[in-house]
Amino acid sequence: MKQQVRPKVAIIFAGGAALSDGRRTTEVRSPRDVPRWVGRFPELQVMADLDPVFVTARHGSDIGPDDWTLIARAIQPRLSRVDGVVVLHGSESIHVTANALSLMLQRVPIPIVLTGTVPSRTARSRSGDPGSRVNILNAVQVATADLAEVCVVFGNRILRGSRVVLTSGPNGLHFTTPDALLIGRLDFGTKLFADRLTRGRRRTSVHIQADANVVVTTVAPGLATPWKMSEPRPSAVLFRIHEPVILPRSFGLSLDALVRSGLPVAVYANRRIVGLPASVAQLVGCTPSMAVVKTMWAAARGGTPASIRRLLEQDVAGEFSPSGGGV
Amino acid sequence: MIRLYFYGPRTTNAGLRRTYQTVKTICERSLIELSSNTETREANLPSETISAYNQSGAPLLDAMQAVIVEATTSDPQIGYLLAYALAEKRPLLLLYTRGESAPDVLRYVSQRDVPKHVTIASYTERNLEAIVGEFLRTLGDVPVREVPRIKFTLRLTRTIDDFLEFKTRHSKLSKADFLRDQLERMIEQDQAFQAFLKKRP
């Protein structure tokens, strides 16, 4: 037979790997389950040489900063050894982990593709599987494509990891971006759009950290403000503001006082708020989950409130820019 | 109507391009709704169907009931389509030219892992039509029609020509297609000829 150089793809098990054929379900709850899972999905070996790695079996809704760190640490040494990485993840929080990985591993030279196994279609396929196998097959295919960024593959969509949001669609979970733009589509194969980041030699910037000790609080009409310092003292505070036009006048002053006490403060709203002190970071234009994740990530970097503010407002991984081109 | 996807890697090889054309002609004559990467418009589907799939987030490949792949030349898409067909239990015909090495992807599929719905066939120009026709018949009620290959010159009277012009003016059929359709109908209904065909070796 003609010999062909096969791509090598790392498969990171981080929950979300359940395979069903209608009669039985195969899950990966520990490293011991990995060979059996791979054996029950021989189709993947047709496409690529696999490097399977178990990281966690945590349910998607329980995944947090410690898990993001574990996943990023499993990916980092493989960046120069494989052609792509697929992360199998509980669908409920794929977008959050994608946000985190976009910040932790910047300017990656290969695709880091997250996908999950919650059905994207109402009907089961002939194999009895609710759509998980096709998602994973598609993710492996995208992991061998000319792409070099963190992305989410779900159904027929390829979405930039720093911009992806979770919504609900006619068939259940649905992923999109705030501007409804994609970096690619899967219809009969992978179609990538021009705005994606492509493979090439680059030095990856690695910042694998996130601080869970961040308070996220909402400012909305009728809620008591300002927020009172709690114990233990958080590493940073993020205010999510729903109605910027009706902020109490004292609000800005109280935020400034918090910053002067050494606490980094960020505000997330759907537009820039006029009149807030310059000491407060304004996160405008990113997704809600990215605002939270970035605050955790920036807080973990340490430094003064001013340096953390600058980091928060900097477009690190395309989180503030419209993503992709096609729809 | 059966929906089928045909994939042929980009090539400048004249023989392969003839193969692609033959496969597409057989499918079209068998009233298959054919989508193919070898066409300018890959998805041959009603716009409402495409829109529905886009909205639901499902790939258009899910709308196909079967897949044919010309796998003589190496192409990563071939591995993907084979993996998809295996995973989704979708009928697949994998073709490669006789005399060439078997497709590299087959190294990773053991004999016992090749299920009944996947057909792997080496073909020649001579038997290609039979192989594809046989595969289409396994998909169900597909009226597989032969591809016309024998040139036949026929002089017509003006009246016959006017008649053919009249019958085909507002249809997509050419005069030659119209005549072939009429003859094929006669063949189907001719019991003596059908009996003759059955006895023929």
Image (spheres, coloured by chain):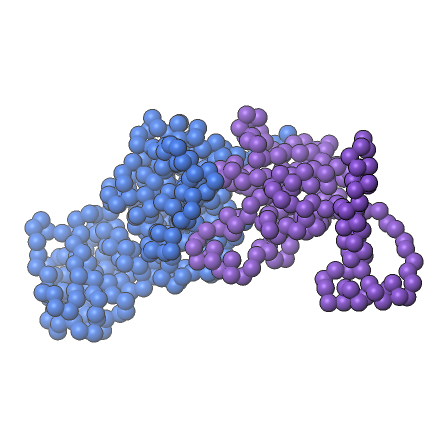
The residue shown at (48%, 35%) is: A44
State the image coordinates of residue A138 (x, y, percent, origin top left).
47, 44
Q: Is residue A286 above or below residue B129?
A: below
Q: Colour of chain B?
A: purple
The residue shown at (72%, 64%) is: B171
The residue shown at (36%, 37%) is: A18
Using the rendered image of the protein, determine whether residue A16 is visible from the camera's viewpoint. yes
Relative horizontal placement of residue A287, taking residue A151 as reference (left or right): left
Name the image quarter holding residue A130. Answer: top left
Q: Is residue B86 above or below residue A196?
A: above
Total marks in image: 0
Using the rendered image of the protein, determine whether residue A100 is visible from the camera's viewpoint. no
The residue shown at (76%, 67%) is: B169
Which quadrant does the N terminus of chain A fall into?
top right
Of all residues shown, which one is farthest toward the front?
B191
Of A276 and A165, which appears nearest the observer? A165
Q: Which chain is blue?
A: A
State the image coordinates of residue A80 (x, y, percent, origin top left).
44, 39
State the image coordinates of residue A82 (x, y, percent, origin top left).
45, 37
Relative horizontal placement of residue B71, taking residue A21 as reference (left or right): right
Of A54 and B24, which appears nearest the observer? B24
Relative horizontal placement of residue B157, taking residue A309 as reference (left or right): right
Name the image quarter holding residue B192. Answer: top right
Q: Is residue A58 above or below residue A218?
A: above
Of A252 and B123, which appears nearest the observer? B123
State the image coordinates of residue B95 (x, y, percent, origin top left).
66, 38
